[in-house]
Each structure stands twice: as C-alpha cells, then as structure tokens.
Amino acid sequence: MNDLFAQCVYLKVYTNIKSYPQSGVFMASQQLATFPKGGVHPEEFKEITEHLPIEIMPPPSEVSLFLKQHVGISCEVVKKDSFIPPSPDYFLSDNAPGSLFELHVKKRDRVNEADLVGSVGKRLGAHLHASIGGTIQGVSNTLHPMMGKAPALIISKDPESKSPQFIEQDWKSFSKEDLLARMNAAGIVGLGGAGFPADFKVNVKPDVHLDTLILNGSECEPYLTCDHRVMLDYPREIIEGAKILMTILGIKNCYIGVEANKPDAIERLNKAVQNDPDKKQFTIIVKPLEVKYPQGSADQIMQSCTGRIRPSGKRSSSIGIIVQNVYTTKIIYDAVVFQKPFYERIITISGKGIARPANLMVRIGTSISDIVTYLGGTTPDLARVIIGGPMMGFAISSLHVPITKTTAGVLFLTHDEIDDQPFGPCIRCGFCLQACPMGLEPNNISIFVEAGKGAQTEQFGLMNDCFECGSCAFVCPAKRPLVQFIRLARLSVEKAKQEKEAKLKQKQEENK
Amino acid sequence: MDKASAEKTIIGRVESPHLSNLSVAVSPHIKNDVTVEKIMWTVSACLMPPLILSVFIFGFQTLIITAVSVISCVVIEAISQKSFRQPIMIKDGSAVITGLLMAYTIPPNVPYWMPILGAFMAIFITKVIMGGIGYNIFNPALIGRAFLLATFPVAMTATWVSPIRDNNLFKYMDSGVDIITTATPLYIIKHYGISGLMEKFGSMSEIYTNFFFGFRPGCIGETSAVLILMGGIILLYKKYITWHIPVSMILTVGLLSWVFGGPQWFSGNPFIAVLSGGIMLGAFFMATDYVTSPTMKTGQIIFGIGVGALTVLIRLKGGYPEGVCYAILLMNPLTPALDQWFRPKRFSEGATQ
C-alpha cells in the first residue's frame, strides 16, 4: 500500500516536470552536455509507455533459447549421424567433439529455472541458462530476427518445477576475480545493442589505462522506455553495480549519462548517489544530456560526458573509458550480489498496433506471439513489427520469434506510424551530411552503390565508422533507404577484398 | 498426420490475416515528414509574393507570361519523361519552380510565346536529358533565360516597363515589343552613373525605398528585395536552405561593387548594387538550388563568393548590364569539384590521443 502511494506521488511530480520541459529544474540549472556533430530529433512517442510500471509476465508454456545470443564464438550443434531428420531439426549431440558451444542437457532432460544449460568455456561468449523450469524438447532451427534462422534450445514448461531462491551477499568482501567469475557465470551480455559479453568488456588487460566508467542511460531510441523504468525502480542497484564495475576496473570516476527527457530518472539517480554510503570513495556524477538521437551511441555518449573522441577502428578503452548500459549494470548487480543468472529481462512493448502497451518483465526465449496473446492481441491496422527501436531495429515477418538477451523492445507500428513511401533520386540537398554524427557521406555512398560501384565506397570510411544509426535515412527528403545502401556497400567492399585476396593467392601459387 | 502439418494448422488458427502480410524493411522505420515535394511546394509558395507585386506594378501580362512559363515547363517535363519511359515526376513541383524562376528573370513585356522555347531548353535539354531531377549540372531556369537572352536579345533587353502604382492591371497589355519604355537601373548606372539614377528617381532615399520595396524597372520577379527576403527567411527558418550561399554572395557583390564600382576605388555604392538586378532572387532562390550547388558549408561559401565576384565582373566589364544569371551558370559546373575538395570532417579526425 505504501508503495502504491509513493507511486502516485511520484507520478504527480513527474507530470509537473514534464509539462514544463523548458523551465524544469534540470533544464534551467545547467547547459546540457551533448555531442556537437550531426544528430536528429525524431518524435519520441515515449509517453505511450513511460508512465507504466514494470509488469511481470507469467512464464510461457514454452521458450526457445538461441544458443548464440552474444558477440563471440559460434554455437552450432552437431547433427547425429545416424539420424537424418525430415525437418531442419537438430538433435542434441552428447557433447559432440568440435562443437565450441557445450550443451549440458540432453533431450527429455528435466531442468529447473535458472539452471545452466549451455556454456562457452573460457572463450568469448556468454553462458545460457534455462529461463523456465521444464523438459528439454531439443534444439531446432528457429526464426531469428537478424540471422534468418538459428538453432535454439526448446524448453517446455513443467508447472510443478520450483522457482529458485537467491540469497543476498555483500559484494565488498569479494576479490576482483570473484566478481568477474560471478559475472561470467550469469551469462550477461550488453543489453544496449550488439550483445558483447559484459565480463569480457570489463576484464581489460593490465597495460590498458582506464580512468572513467560511463553508464549509458540515454535511451535515445523513440518508443523504448525499459531503461527509463529500470532507472526509476532500481537506482540504488545501478549505483551499486557501478561501484562493482569500478572496483573491477580499479577506477574511481563514473558518469551516468541520461537524456534530459527523463528528469524523474535523473532525480532518483541523484538521490541514490547522495544516499550512497561510499560516496567519498567513488565519484559518481549523473549527467543530463541533450535530447538528440543518437545520444546513446558509445562514441557520442563518450564525447558528451568527457569530451573525448575515440580514434577510428579502436576500442573505447584506448581513450580510457568503458561504457556500459544502465540496465546491464543492474543485471551485473543481481549476478554478483544474488548470483542470479541472466534469464529474464524487461522489454518495452509499444506502438499503436498493440492492444495494451507495457513495460514487461519476460523470460528470455518467450515467443512474441505469447506476449501478444498476453497483452490482448494486435489491432487490425498493424503494419510492421520491429524488434528493437524504430531507428535501428529489425522488422520481422512473423510473430513466432523469441525474445533474446539483447531485445530491448518489440514495437507494433500501424500504417500511419511507419514511413513506406517509394524513394526517388538524390537531389543533393546535403541534409544527410548534416545529420551524420560520424561525418560520413551517405549521399555519395548511395550514388556509388546505385551506379554499381559499391566496392569503391571504402574511401568514405563506412567500414569502421558507420554504426547504421539511420540519421541519414531519417532526414532524407527523397526517402532514400540510405542504411540499406550502406549495408550493400559494406557487402561489396568485403566481396572485393575477398576477390583480391583470392587473386593474390592464385598469383603466388603460379609463381611457385 | 505428421507433426509439421499439425503445427501449421495451429499457427494458422492463432494468426490473424493481417499478421501474415507484415511489411519488412531496413531500418530506420520512421522518417521525418520533410519530402522533396514539400520542399519544392514551399519554395513555390515563397515565390508567390513577388509575382503578386509584379502584377500590380507591371500589369496583368506578367501573370500570363509566368503562367505560360510554368505550364509549358510542366507539360514539357511530362511529355519528355513519358517519351523516355521514365516515371513522370511533375508532382514533385521542381518543374513548377523552374517555370516560375525562368519567368521571374525575363522582362515584363515579352511576347507570350517566348517562355515556351525557354522551357524546352530548361526542362528537356538541361534536365530530362541529363537524367532528371538530381542529375542536371546547370540550373534549368537560368539555362532557359540564357537561351532566350541569346536568341531574342531585343525582346529580352528592351521591353522594360516603368512600375506604375495603380489599380489598372491592363496598363501595359498588348503594347508589344516596339515600345521601349524605360531602362533598368543597372543600364542607367552602367552608362550614365549614379547621377543618371538620381535624375530618374529624385533623391538617394527615394532610390533606396523604391529599390527595397520593388518599384523599379526590372524582370518580373526580381524587383522587390523585401518580398524575396521574406521568402528566403522562411526557407532559412524551415532549414531548407542554409545562409552560406546567399550571405557570401550578397557580401561579395556589395564589397566588390564598393571597391570597383565607382569612378575611383572604394567609391561604389554597395546597397544599390545589391538591391538592383537579380542579386536577391539569385542569392536566395537560384544559387541555393540543391542539385547545382555544393553540399558542404565551405564549398557553399566559396560558391557564393564565386557567383558574387563573377556577377560584379560581368556588370562592370561585360557587355550586359546584369551578370547574375551567367555568374551562377558559370559556377554550377564547379559544384562537383567543390564537393570533392571540401568533404565533411570525420568524427574520428578530432580523436583524442
């Protein structure tokens, strides 16, 4: 009851701030930090879900866990030789030699929630845990939002399986190795985008000099609000997680970059920093950032918070910074303090095409069709379903796609929300040049690709610098799909490189 | 029944029909609402006030000339795109702008059939044959004007009429080419100096007011600095154009006219130089044409300076009293080179070591 009351009060305060965005406490008191080059201002649409508290979805009857949900080693399961399946189903090998990914379960095994089902050993990758208790149905090729189809472990629910108990421990007594081991055991990947294993990110070589940790809470994509809700509900956990990361890295400075359209989150984080018992030991600064896309990109948030710029093709640690998402930090806190594996996450379900938008806590591997059923179905004018945000997310053609560790949201967009106009020729207005945060030339790349000269586009620096934020295509008045052109250009540059290498090899063999 | 088909029926039952034709595309899935059509029609709207003014001061025939120019541009674009089996793009409004700008740069009393020939040069030769919108090297409207100036020099340089502030819209109707009614300010300055202009308009302040509000002899749409400035400011506010080309061009014209424009050095009048002829129209609506001007700011400033310098050179040394049209046309082919020389600065170029 007390919680409910607090929620009401907070909502009231929050609306007050929101209705006077220019005169709010955070706006007036300081010049907002931002990155100077490029950027766009898409309409936010965050009001659909930002006021909704996190809702826990009951475990579904079946989950599909992709074996590879991380950046790192490939995760194929070897087919059984004696059995040729009629469908593209794979069957579990008994720890088949040669497979990098090791499955710890067999078909028809019973597992409990949070049990380890697959591991990557010491290699780059993340362990996999059962997100529901039940029976292993096998590994089958499942629709993947990005890769077409990929092998996934299917678990069907057993209603009698027990849910695990997690005991809180004080992390301050742990050594650096203990902390890293706990992070590794939980199978955490970066929740912001690509899915880089979190423990590998902070396990830097001793000769790399670091001085700053940046927690990325900007959440610049329109519609998405899951990080916002996490910052509101778990500010203390985020600060503790930041301290864990700083202890591992051996540094004292941390910035939490939050876009200024989340004044309530900034307020709560500031309060948590003030109440922090170790505030003499660590300097944590909550930095309100200008509302500008792509503020949440690593390069941009590093420049906004510290003014430093990453050299092309190098890691952010080369300029002394590690960037982590705020939600990843909260998951790291859970993993270290509770030894809780990463098997459930909060996602934003939004858009005008869904009956009931929500910030939903779901098990990894839950099918989107189950979520749709839980939320009351879709509207008939639904036109596109997107995994991730509208600027960088992937459109899917079927709802039978499971949630992965990196899914921040599922958007159900109607015809009037998406842009489906046919594109015309480039009129050389130069809008994309002004919008590109990396200083690239999307107009020229697209013209080169159209002329069949995609292999010559490497001069525009797209291989290292373009992270496909979509700012160029967003502003293009001719509605040219510039991101698509850039992807095509990348493909042809890679193809040309391979051909060149093959020719060189041939020549060398001839010379022999 | 095998397992696969059983699954299929379940899927069919669960999915509604609209879920089976979800559209798939590459990100970003949302785009802003600025389209080529929107930009072009906004520019056309910004060009309307000078036309309305010219109807009142030069007479109703300016509207007919403009209408002929616009309609012939649109029709020629439609016909040529149809005959080349290209998609017909008259809806994007670029042909309308070409027609408007061409009409605005010809005198108010030319024969009504003349813009049709100009439109053919502008649209067919300069635009459609080059590959359509986005591929032309030269500004189509100015090519149309240059063609008319070369082929019909008398009609294009001797049909000026004096602006009359009254409500009779038909004052100059059907007066034809034979009547030389007046001379443009630039012609007067070129041949008689500032004193000639003073004789015609009275005092210096009279000159400035008349020039600023547009009550002076000149082409149909170029006379009123204030109305063109208004349109230009709307485009700047909407961020459809940037200040770099107009400002650099106008400043260059003013500076060079001040230095070289008078009988001695540093004695020219920069304000008259900027307010006369087609400087304002050229600076805000022609030199800023996306297709034929550089995309980067540095290139745009150099482009504007080049246009301004060439204009002053032609005005002071050339055979024609006005040089904006040729100055822009001469700078247009430099655009690809300027784009190559002045690239955007990469993010990583400012990298911290």
Image (cartoon, rainbow, N blue to C red):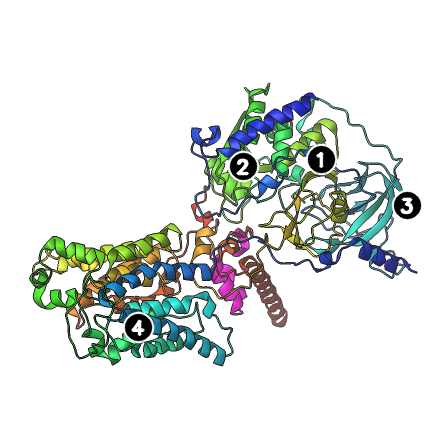
Residue A203 in view (yes/no): no
Q: CA distance from mark 4 to mark 1?
A: 68 Å
Residue B107 is drawn in which quadrant?
bottom left
Q: Residues within 10 Å of mark 3 (few under 14, many from 20)?
A: few
Which of pointers 3 and 1 lies earlier in the amino acid sequence?
1
Cα distance between the residues tagged 1 and 2: 34 Å
Check whether the beta carbons of the residues at disc 3 and disc 1 lie within 8 A of each other. no
Q: Which residue is mark 4?
A: B65
Which chain contains the residue that carries disc 1?
Answer: A
Which residue bears the numbered disc 1? A55
Judged from this view, the residue extending furthest toward the right is B1
- Which residue is tagged 2? A321
- Percent x, y of residue B124: 40, 77
Spot occupied by residue A329 in the image (x, y as percentages of width and height): 64, 33
Q: Give the chain letter at badge 4.
A: B
Residue B311 pos. (x, y %): 22, 64
Q: Main secondary structure of the magenta part?
A: helix
* Camera-side mark, 3 or 4: 4
Nearest to viewer (mark 3 / mark 1): 1
Disc 4 residue crowd, few under 14, some 14–19, many 20+, Cα 10 Å = many
Disc 2 to disc 4, C-alpha distance: 66 Å
Q: CA distance from mark 3 to mark 4?
A: 85 Å
* Left or right of residue A235: residue B14: right
Identify whether B115 is placed above or below A130: below
Q: Chain of mark 2?
A: A
Label 2 – label 3 distance at C-alpha: 46 Å
Magenta stretch? A441-467
- The residue identified by callout 3 is A108
Magenta run includes residue A460: yes
B234 is within the stretch colored magenta: no
